[in-house]
Amino acid sequence: MTNHNLFAALRSAFPGDLDEVAIETGPGLLYSWRDLEHGSAMMANLLQSLNLPEGARIAVQVEKSVEAMVLYLATLRAGYVFLPLNTAYQSAEIEYFLGNAEPSVVVCGSANFGWVSKIAFKAGTQNVFTLDDDRTGSLLERAAHCSDRHEVVARQADDMAAILYTSGTTGRSKGAMLSHGNLLSNARVLKDYWGWKPGDVLIHALPIFHVHGLFVAIHGALINGSKMIWLSKFDPKKVIEKLPEATVFMGVPTLYVRLLAEPGLNREACRSMRLFIAGSAPLLIETFREWQERTGHTILERYGMSETAMLTSNPYQGGERRGGTVGFALPGVSLRVVDDTGQRLPPGEIGNIQVKGPNVFSGYWRMPEKTAEEFTLEGYFRTGDVGKVDADGYITIVGRSRDLIISGGYNVYPAEIEGFINELPGVLESAVVGVPHPDFGEVGVAVVIARPGATLDSLRIVAEMKSKMANFKVPKHCFVVSELPRNTMGKVQKNVLREQYKALFA
């Protein structure tokens, strides 16, 4: 019987010579394919020695490292469910995730062990390990005593491989359940669509706690048996230094803006590059054009979600890469634009984007009602994004029906921020909107009304948010006003606020 475990497919793509270099890190440390094979086997054996229940979740909040990636591979290999958590999350956020997911294992940085372990044990977690980006931690100490031989655990295509948390407009985070089949189908499609070939080398400069860095980049390199040049943090000078040794680069728009600020970025630096890919946030047309002029390369924009991995892409070859669009639906993906009644709209008309395909998740963790709401009777997933398809089939995302802000590639949900602000002393009401930003694509702006008789300090409100939540969620500006614009039904008109503040960072 075929083993549909995603790790089995990735492992089968390793080169015949396991002593070839698989990963080169910033400090010059080299990892071979044999290191990935043995390291993932040892960690998988450690996890299995803990006698975890079937479908156990392994929650991980650590700094980026090759060992952290190996832990992901080990989790797949042992048949458990990987749960990556943004390193910026603070205690209240971690408390919710661990309480909701009830992981059997939590892995965190040594510096956070004190507070994370308390939350984990309270949530019923039996095992808490540490893992740091300098190749230390209790996870590695324990794994060092385990065998480096391991038989990959058999899994069906629809068995869960990962849970990715994505907040909703209510502020309550939802865990998107992704299967081995979801992730493998997407990896295989992208391998063909983006023309991965022998000898490709990927510069990996993204975080590995969300779809882009973890699934799109890592799966892309591994399923092609390609070497990765691994940067623990994005450094534009280091990326430019490494471009002549690479062929593929993936980044969020913020990274391209920062690369363009470097005088060393030119056609000569990009002479060996084959493909630059952008996603996770809208790419400004100015950035798209300036990149063409400076490097001679046209950035390939694509579109995906936590719930679906990649859905669309501009063509690698055989067609024009159009700035401002996200290209065509990928092979196997059915995408339609419909009105509020579910009727399909003709080309050029703006409506709600719905998708169906082997890459689309099965639903939200422990939220059957929410899952039912988000799927149509025909099995299409309601993405919550608004867009259009032109006469040539190119898809353009024009907005997000749920007021989602994508700042530097991270999802920021205004309702979550508003809920926090509204609880602060003296606050009557707040509204958070996204406005254009030359570096981050979009950033949040908070507009706040004080309670009668109260005096609010906008700087203090921002400082309070920074102390309690991930920095990428914190609005870049806060304005205290006497009233919010409303329609006749009393609903805040966020479109008016966006228009009012759209030039704030111009």
Image (spheres, rainbow, N blue to C red):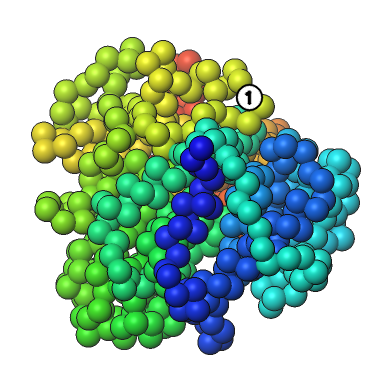
Position of the C terminus by quadrant: bottom left
Q: Residue at x 66, y 50 (%)?
A: 78
Identify residue type, mark 1: Met
Q: Residue at x 49, y 40 (%)?
A: 2
Can residue 314 be seen here? The reply is yes
Q: Element at badge 1?
A: loop
Viewer-proximal residue, 449 or 282? 282
Q: Position of residue 344 (x, y in %)?
A: 24, 19
Q: Residue at x 44, y 45 (%)?
A: 184
Q: Name the image quarter holding residue 340.
A: top left
Q: Position of residue 159 (x, y in %)?
A: 57, 35
Drawn side of residue 303 relative to residue 214, left or right: left
Q: Name the image quarter holding residue 427.
A: top right
Residue tagged by mark 1? 367
Can residue 464 be seen here? The reply is no
Q: Position of residue 163 (x, y in %)?
A: 60, 41
Q: Position of residue 63 (x, y in %)?
A: 65, 66
* Residue 239 sits above or below residue 439 on the image: below
Drawn side of residue 246 relative to residue 85, left or right: left
